Structures are given as C-alpha cells and as structure tokens.
Image (cartoon, grey):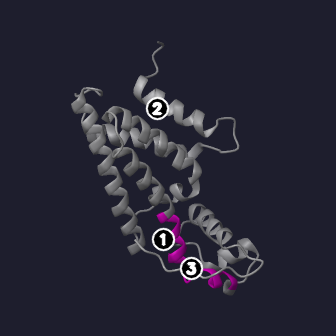
C-alpha cells in the first residue's frame, strides 16, 4: 500500500510528533472518534499546522499501519528465507516479532485493533493475513519436520502462538524492569521448551 508523499516539516514542528500524537489518540479514542482538531490540540498546534505535514487523518492511519506491517513483513520474510531448520526459523521469527512489537508498540497496537472499516484498514488486514499465512506455513513445515507435535492443527498453533506475542502490546511497558531481549527470550523459551522444570 502506498501513502501520499509527506510534506517537509515546518520549522519548530516535528512531523513524527504529529504521527505519534495521532496514533496515541487513535488507540485511546478510536480512529473514527479522533479528529484532526483533536490531534492539533494535543500538540498545541493549529489544524493548519497539522495539515502542513499530512493531507488527511487517513494518511496518518495508513502510515502508522504501514510502519507496523513493514517491520513485521521484513522480520518474517528475512527469517523465512534464511538457512536452518523450520523450527529454528520459527523460533527466530517469534523472537523477532517480539522485538518488532516492542520497538513499534503503538503502531502494532493500532494494527491489532483494525476492523476493516475503511479502504486503508481493509488493505492493512489483507497484508496482515498474508503475514499470518506465511507464519502458518512455517509452523506446518516445523510440524512436518517432526520438531512440533503433529496432533494439533498447524494453523491453530500459529494463531495461539502469535496471539500470545500480540497480547504483549496490551501490557508491556518499555520503561519497566523487563528488557526487550529478556522478553523475547522468555517467550521463545515458554513456547518451544515449555514451563516444566528441566
């Protein structure tokens, strides 16, 4: 999905701050309930100052969703095409997915709340389903290798696995005591090695 080319920032105003404020409001109030005026007020700007950076509220939504989807797609594509067993690649894609979620938590959180109410959201859901299919394919390969149990449907495994990863968006705090690396390592350990004492 392509988004309109952004305009250069006006001196004294940070374009990234406009996007960050929009995403925060979309998450808190919902996309439909958020106006450009709300975004401007949250930054202490005028509406015209916001429109200097972007052409519409929809552009802000598209850019935020593209940020999350581009990073997730890159993680999945690079790991899927790497060498190694399917189980090793699956473990790595889980680890990378956690890292992407933490690095882009607001954008990923927004992506997880999209329901397809606009062309932009429908396009985002289409891209998200493509990622889900790639992940399910990797799970299936690992099952066929004998690395994962074969008595559970691979697509169900994929949904449960990445449902757990996605749930991190709701509770993880980057300024907390758990680092990104610790979080990624813990998730992969629990998923692939279980909780039983060694």
Mark carried by residue 62 = 1
Q: How far across and how far down the image is residue 152, in percent?
A: 25, 31
Is residue 29 one of those drawn in magenta? no
Residue shown at the point (68%, 68%) measured from the top left: 17
Residue that mark 3 sits on: 6
SS at badge 2: helix
| Label 1 secondary element | helix
**Mark 1 surroundings: few (<14), some (14-19) or many (≥20) residues within 10 A:** some
Quadrant position of the N terminus in the picture: bottom left
Which one is in front in this view, the residue at disc 3 or the one at disc 1?
3
Q: Is residue 94 above or below residue 147?
A: below
* Residue located at (29% from left, 27% from top): 147
What kind of element bears circle 3? Answer: loop
Instruction: Give the quadrant of residue 194.
Output: top left
Kindly tell me whether residue 113 is visible in this rendering: no
- Estimate the spatial distance between the alpha carbons at disc 3 and disc 1, rounded to whole Å: 12 Å
Residue at position x 53%, y 30% in the image: 186
| Residue 188, numbered circle | 2
Vertical arrangement, residue 50 with respect to residue 89, above or below: below
Residue range (magenta)? 49-66
């Amino acid at each position: 999905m392509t988004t309109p080319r952004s305009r250069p920032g006006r001196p004294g105003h940070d374009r990234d701050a406009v996007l960050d404020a929009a995403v925060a409001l979309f998450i808190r109030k919902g996309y439909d309930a958020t106006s450009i005026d709300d975004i401007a007020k949250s930054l202490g700007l005028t509406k015209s100052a916001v429109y200097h950076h972007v052409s519409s509220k929809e552009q802000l939504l598209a850019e935020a969703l593209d940020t999350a989807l581009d990073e997730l797609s890159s993680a999945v594509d690079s790991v899927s095409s790497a060498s190694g067993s399917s189980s090793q690649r699956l473990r790595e894609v889980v680890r990378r997915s956690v890292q992407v979620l933490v690095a882009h938590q607001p954008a990923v959180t927004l992506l997880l709340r999209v329901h397809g109410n606009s062309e932009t959201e429908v396009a985002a859901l289409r891209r998200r389903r493509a990622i889900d299919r790639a992940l399910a394919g990797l799970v299936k390969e690992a099952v066929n290798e004998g690395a994962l149990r074969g008595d559970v449907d691979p697509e169900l495994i994929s949904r449960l696995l990445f449902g757990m990863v996605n749930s991190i968006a709701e509770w993880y705090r980057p300024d907390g005591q758990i680092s990104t690396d610790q979080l990624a390592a813990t998730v992969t350990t629990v998923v692939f090695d279980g909780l039983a004492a060694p």
